[in-house]
Image: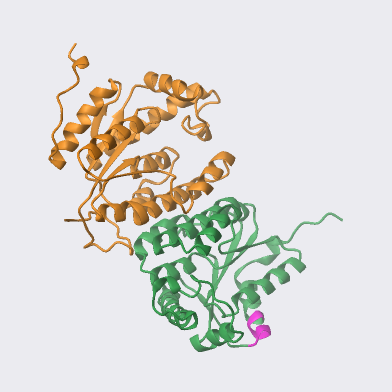
């Protein structure tokens, strides 16, 4: 058992002495950087090794997940409102799902965490101190893996996935460019800048996500395996050449 | 809270315990200003259409914890602030607010939310030009509310805090704690106190004279073409 660690703030629902035996691992990176695929594979591997796994992500709370989806479609929320709505969704999941799972000894795999939420707010001009304060009562993860990927790769993968660029992933609400492709590239670059800035501050592990699925998965298993004292198979051969 | 004001409008807020009569008073202010053809806009706590759906669903199912209760109300406030309050202040309106950030400070602090965290979250909000605090002894406001044995809602009664299983007893405890929070805030936030045990008419006379003294109302007259 270990005590939960917080970034600075405190939540009335989670006393400082809250003890947990589970672990929280976070995967961060742009849409199309391969997070979901990697999380799936990590889950299989952990379960194969007898660990209970819970998956979590953004906009999945019972509380406001649905309303956030609606608001996104209508594009009617202003900046602070959107930030606060997302934070409501996040803290609902933290308090009602993530922490209970950690207490029960599960490995929680988070498909994005506060870093994406903060980066999105910051590129939209939110005050840095305000955003940091908002998320300061969040739980510090055991490890954060940031998927770095080139803009070109990202565009290719987004087209492969849905044949189109997503309005929000292109940051169209920012008015960077009326051209969606141009906006997408510029928006992703702005987000990356925020992530790079956060990397030092929050100690992310940075992964080159341009590589093969198996290679990235192996990297992740080595790092997580070390923390959990799990055996990891050798690196896939295809990467030798 | 933002102290500097870069717009021609004025913001008047009312605060006080449930049953202090503040909504009646702000309604009468609204009617007074409207009938005198002033540019006036009224906004109420927890009324953003967008957020309301989520809030009422959450409240019905008792899904809210102190933190999410606090954040969902902050979301509601931000939506009204960014889309109505601030634009209207900039457009030169008299904006009347039935409850303002102080309601959040009081209620959420009672629920154990960190006041510093909360103050930072609401730091984008401008300080009202006048904040009327309708001061009423706790037993008076409790009697006004509980007289008709109304059905108290779960969060309204503070039942989520587990102080008492009896809604009326829980409400009494909750309101008592909120009263303590308000009295701690009175000086710090420069509330203008009104004795809420006076007749409605007496209170309104006071309120109108304070507003007339502090705000140059002539500036807010609608210009009508003849």
Residue A149 lies left or right of residue B185; in this view the side is left
Looking at this view, is B100 or A82 the one in front? A82
Q: Is residue B96 above or below residue A192?
A: below
Residue A228 lies left or right of residue B66; in this view the side is left
In orange, which chain?
A
Q: Tell me the residue at 67%/66% (across/down).
A: B217
Residue A179 location (% of width, % of height): 54, 23
Q: Tell me the residue at 54%/59% (across/down).
A: B57
Looking at this view, is B32 or A74 the one in front? A74
Total count of labels: 0
- The magenta-colored residue range is B199-204
Q: Tell me the residue at 77%/68% (across/down).
A: B35
Residue A210 location (% of width, % of height): 30, 21
Q: Quadrant of residue A233?
A: top left
Residue B212 location (% of width, % of height): 65, 72
Instruction: Please state, as top left, top right, bottom left or bottom right, where the N terminus of chain B lies in the image.
Output: bottom left
Residue A201 lies left or right of residue A34; in this view the side is left
Instruction: Please state, as top left, top right, bottom left or bottom right, where the C terminus of chain B lies in the image.
Output: bottom right
Looking at this view, is A211 or B113 the one in front? A211
Q: Quadrant of residue B29?
A: bottom right
The structure's colour scheme is by chain
Q: Is residue A168 above or below residue A164?
A: below
Residue B160 location (% of width, % of height): 42, 70
Residue B76 lies left or right of residue B33; in this view the side is left
Task: Residue at the far right: name it.
Answer: B226
In green, which chain?
B
Looking at this view, is A103 or B14 the one in front? A103
* Majority secondary structure in the magenta region: helix
Q: Say whether residue B37 is magenta.
A: no
Q: Tell me the residue at 54%/88% (across/down).
A: B140
């Amino acid at each position: 058992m270990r005590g939960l660690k917080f970034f600075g703030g405190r939540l009335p629902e989670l006393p400082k002495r809250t003890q947990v035996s589970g672990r929280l691992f976070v995967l961060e990176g742009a849409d199309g950087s391969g997070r979901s695929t990697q999380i799936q594979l990590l889950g299989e591997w952990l379960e194969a090794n007898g660990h209970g796994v819970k998956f979590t992500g953004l906009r999945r709370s019972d509380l406001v997940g649905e309303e956030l989806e609606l608001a996104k479609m209508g594009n009617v929320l202003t900046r602070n409102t959107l930030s606060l709505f997302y934070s409501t969704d996040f803290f609902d999941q933290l308090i009602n799902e993530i922490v209970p799972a950690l207490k029960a000894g599960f490995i929680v795999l988070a498909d994005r965490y506060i870093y994406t939420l903060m980066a999105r707010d910051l590129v939209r001009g939110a005050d840095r101190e305000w955003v940091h304060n908002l998320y300061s009562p969040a739980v510090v993860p055991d490890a954060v893996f940031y998927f770095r990927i080139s803009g070109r790769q990202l565009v290719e993968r987004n087209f492969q996935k849905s044949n189109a660029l997503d309005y929000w992933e292109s940051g169209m609400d920012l008015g960077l460019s009326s051209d969606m492709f141009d906006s997408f590239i510029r928006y992703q670059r702005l987000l990356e800048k925020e992530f790079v800035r956060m990397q030092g501050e929050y100690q992310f592990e940075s992964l080159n996500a341009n590589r093969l699925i198996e290679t990235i998965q192996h990297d992740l298993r080595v790092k997580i395996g070390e923390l959990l004292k799990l055996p990891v198979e050798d690196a896939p051969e295809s990467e030798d050449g | 809270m933002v102290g500097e004001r870069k717009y021609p409008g004025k913001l008047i807020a009312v605060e006080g315990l449930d049953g202090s009569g503040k909504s009646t008073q702000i309604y009468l202010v609204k009617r007074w200003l409207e009938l005198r053809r002033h540019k006036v806009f009224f906004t109420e706590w927890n009324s953003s259409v967008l957020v309301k759906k989520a809030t009422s669903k959450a409240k019905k199912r008792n899904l809210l914890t102190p933190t999410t209760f606090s954040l969902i109300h902050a979301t509601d406030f931000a939506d009204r602030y960014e889309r109505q309050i601030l634009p209207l202040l900039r457009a030169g309106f008299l904006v009347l607010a039935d409850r303002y950030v102080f309601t959040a400070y009081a209620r959420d602090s009672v629920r154990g939310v960190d006041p510093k965290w909360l103050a930072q979250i609401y730091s984008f909000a401008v300080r009202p030009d006048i904040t009327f605090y309708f001061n009423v002894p706790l037993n008076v406001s409790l009697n006004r509310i509980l007289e008709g044995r109304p059905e108290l809602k779960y969060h309204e009664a503070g039942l989520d805090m587990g102080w008492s299983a009896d809604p009326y007893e829980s409400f009494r405890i909750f309101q008592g704690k909120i009263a303590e929070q308000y009295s701690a805030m009175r000086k710090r936030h420069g509330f203008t106190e009104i004795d809420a045990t006076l007749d409605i008419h007496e209170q309104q006379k006071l309120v109108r004279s304070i507003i007339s003294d502090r705000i140059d109302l002539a500036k807010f007259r609608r210009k009508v073409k003849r």
